Amino acid sequence: MHKKQHKQTLIVIATVAALGATNQAVAQQLEEVVVTAQKRSESMQEVAVSITAVDGDTLSAMNVRNSSQLAEITPNLTIQSDRPGNSFPAIRGIGTPIKGPGVDQGVAIYLDGVQVDSSGANLLSVVDLEQIEVLKGPQGTLYGRNAVGGVINMVSRRPADDFQVSLTGGFGNYGSWETGASIEGPLVDNVLIGRISGVYSENDAYFKNREPGVDDNGASEDSTIRGMLVYMPTDDLEITFSADYSDTDTSGPAWRTIGVSNHQANAAALAGLIVPVWREPDNDKYKLSHNLDSFNNSEIYGGSVKIDWALSDSWDFISITGYRETEQELLEDLDASPNQYLEVASATEFNNTTQEFRLHYTDDSLKGVVGFFYNESENDNLFSVDSFVEFLPGAGGAAPSTTARGGETEAWSVFTQWDWDISESLTLILGARYSDSEKETYRNETSFTEIYAVNQANGVDRCFVLESGLKPENQPACLTQVVPGQETNAKGDGSWSSFTPKVGLRYIFEGGTMLYGTYSQGYRDGGLAGSAADFTEFDEEVVDAYEVGFKSELAEGSVRFNGSMFFYDYEDLQLQLSDLSGNQVVTKIFNAGEAEMYGAELELSWLASDFFTLHANMGYLDTEITDLDEDPNIDYGFIRTGNEFPQAPQFSASLIPEFYFNVLGGSVLWRTEINYVDEHFEDAENGGFATAADAGALTGSAIVDNGGFDPSLVVNEGDLVDHETYDARTLVNTSFIWTNESGNLDITLWARNLFDEEYEETRRYVSGVVFTEARYGLPRTYGIKADYRF
């Protein structure tokens, strides 16, 4: 941590301690937190799983807009997001190193019981949610495939039984403003209730573009609509219809080149061309030099029907039918510079349909569930790469390409889990799940040879058109006038199955403290990946997880103190490497071998008085790749035994004080979030090192770039050319909420990133391109908003 960060953090902590010490009134009890982690409603303190729950009022108070910001208050959770609509969450260092549309995730995301089965559709709006629950550790029994790291469970707000209308509006810096409304209540007394809400927001660009005539980056328009109907024809039957829609249009993403970390080279070698790596002229993280008006637009929508039928006093039947769909288009300046040599257009469509049936049993000593789950999903992505345009005249041509890729997945599973109270204090937990999936994958690549002389003869600067969703056959005829497009097609299919058990014990001491120990297994599905010329199958990834933990409420219910320790043992670890091959960025996914991880978490909530509450949490991780398979067909790059997991900071912590006091004829809640995340690696290579070919090219281009030979410009094989490390960072968010005496008006002053911390939100490094770029987190934002209810 930098000295500045230390100073800022200590100032805030000292303020919290001083103010908290002034309130010595007798504390009341903390409110009970009810979760649905085990697919039934129960107190969080009774569930033998490490859980962090955040309610909708807290999300609104801190102006949290999407699920990625949840990582700021959850220990051992990191979420990378390089574009609107998609995210890559990791819980306890387990997420996915595999980036791309349609790939399997390591953290399962659910909205109203429906699995969101794609990274391209899982960065969801959290506006008007009732609660978000983060379940840590493999959840293979109840949630199945791709819950190897855990689950993020999002629950929409249920309609009220009485008529209510709410209006909201606000504005802030960077030209931000929002407006919204909701209406809810009975439609048919005691039979049908409903709720519908909508919010619209927009902001100006956060990142300024130095290039004249090119749009700034980060401007956004967002719309979110949610609706729910609850039909109760009898006392034993309830049917819930829910739907949501969000539309996000942004200018971006805002990538900024950061070059090579050892400063020995200042260029990249692409297909034999010496291409200069752009360096920004100053250290202003919020100024860029893109030559392209980039954009990223996404629509995400879906709905579900839930049937909850009480068959008897002991048996309940639940059915959840869901559908999700995403449409996304983008145009991106991939080289993040005023040069024009690596630009991308992409269009993605994703949909999935799910069906779950469950039978729940409950009596005095036994609780359990038996269920069936079915999922069918389809993903189609068309992306074009326009490369080396800057060098058309000198090189004689360019090599643009268009690739259509995607596939279908059909998966089903049967599962069960039971809690048997052996005695009043001791409970045995047993669970199991059998899962089966079948996948079909395709990849069709069309490579073009664009010749500068042909362009001139046709009176155009370019024959190739870079446009989102434009198919190869719709390109201008002059593009293939001399050299036809070269097509490479491939299809693949495969099937995978897995049996994932769980066993555990829970013991409740006199006074209510609970101690638990569990063994569980999780897995990430296998699949197919690679280029059309090199389509390979990889196996499922399996993790054995051992966890012990405790949950306690002390001091007459004014203190909630929970903790856990865990150890994970990996087999067939899935990893990804990206390289430049034939002017294409090629992604290789393979099973690397074995890995281990251990860690711990602590969470504390202390209702110190009527005026002061303190929440604190911390997480610790130690990760290591312990063994690599000796496969001569696999190029492991710089993945070595001893390397750490990506997105796995060794230490993370949050301190969240809340103060309550009366002022101006109402009451005020002052809440502050202080979140620290240790440095951690971007990917499993833990750094980019020069190969023999890179070393020569980098040395030569550095000499050209610097206008002469200098010994310091020599790059040797094995030299570090990128450290691939996210620096440690501390973020502070705060809000003041004034509520009038009647309780129907809230006025909120809020600020995010209060101390204007500069930090990398996402970074990427491709070894075949040999340069690194980063996308920085938002600067300090602040505003005011009002919520009125009547």
Image (cartoon, rainbow, N blue to C red):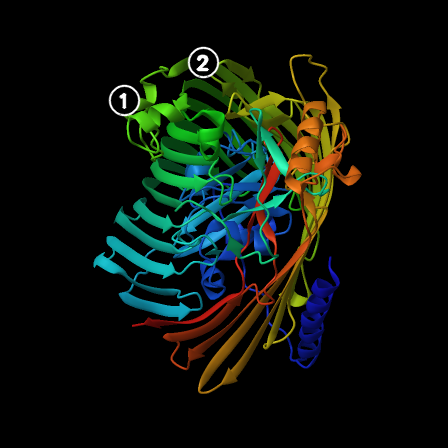
Q: Position of residue 79 (x, y in %)?
A: 56, 46
Q: Secondary structure at mark 1?
A: helix
Q: Residue furthest right?
A: 711
Compare marks 1 and 2 and give the one earlier in the sequence: 1
Residue picked out by circle 2? 492
Q: Nearer the viewer, residue 346 or 526?
A: 346
Residue picked out by circle 1? 477
The amino acid on which the numbered mark 2 sits, given as a three-letter code, is: Gly
Q: Residue drawn at (38%, 55%), measured in percent from left and top?
A: 220
Q: Residue drawn at (49%, 29%), measured in percent from left and top?
A: 394
The tally of labels here is 2
Q: Is 318 on the left-hand or right-hand side of 599?
A: left
Find the distance from the CA under tag 1 to the CA under tag 2.
Answer: 31 Å
Relative to 320, say whether 734 is above or below: below
Q: Position of residue 354 (x, y in %)?
A: 37, 31
Foreground: disc 1 or disc 2: 1
| Placement of the N terminus among the 4 image quadrants | bottom right
Q: Is 768 on the left-hand or right-hand side of 319?
A: right
Q: Position of residue 231 (x, y in %)?
A: 26, 48
Q: Residue drawn at (34%, 72%), measured in percent from left and top?
A: 788
Q: Which mark is residue 247?
A: none
- Examine the rendering and report whether any part of residue 730 can be seen: yes
Q: Position of residue 103 (x, y in %)?
A: 49, 29
- Examine the rendering and report whether any part of residue 93 can be seen: no
Q: Is 446 on the left-hand or right-hand side of 424?
A: left
Q: Dot 1: few (<14), some (14–19), or many (≥20) neighbours within 10 Å? A: few
Q: Nearer the viewer, residue 224 or 703?
A: 703
